[in-house]
Amino acid sequence: MSEILSAVKNVIATSFEIPVEQISDSCSDQTIEQWDSVGHINLVMALEQEFGLSFTMEEIMHLRDIAAISKAIAEKSGRPAAA
């Protein structure tokens, strides 16, 4: 598991107050009950803080699953999304 993916899973677990063991590579706003519109904004803010990045409004709209989040962070940080 890549460093980014692992960190994203930890941020999601913390943001939605669920065990990190319940976060799979296929989790999305459709599979996590707490991931509503307010939860999404809180998650984005936590990701920005964790990775020291800022997302545009358009990017935020596309951060709806772990793969998209990891890819966006990798692109912005220049780090690999997957190992």
Image (cartoon, helix red, strand yellow):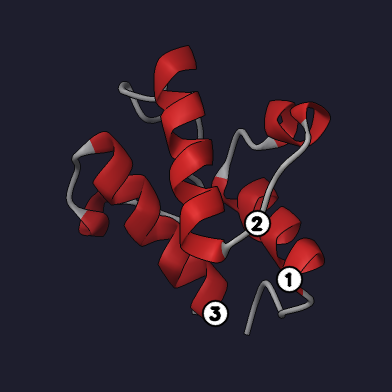
Height in image: 37 above or below 35? above
**Mark sitting on residue 53:** 2
Disc on the earlier residue, 3 or 2: 3
Q: Check if mark 2's residue and mark 1's residue have beta carbons within 8 Å.
A: yes
Q: Position of residue 80 (x, y in %)?
A: 71, 79
Query: Residue pushed farthest bottom?
Result: 83
Which residue does the numbered mark 3 point to in the structure image? 2
Which residue does the numbered mark 1 point to in the structure image? 77
Residue drawn at point x = 43 percent, y = 46 percent: 46
How many residues crowd around disc 1 within 10 Å: few (fewer than 14), some, or many (20 or more)? some
Query: Residue pushed farthest top?
Result: 37
Q: Measure the C-alpha gap from mark 2 to mark 1.
A: 8 Å
Q: Position of residue 49 (x, y in %)?
A: 48, 54
Q: Which three-letter amino acid code belongs to the residue tagged 3? A: Ser
Image-quadrant location for residue 39: top left
From the viewer's perspective, tell me whether residue 52 is left or right of residue 36. Answer: right
Q: Measure the C-alpha gap from mark 3 to mark 1.
A: 14 Å
Tell me if residue 36 can be seen.
no
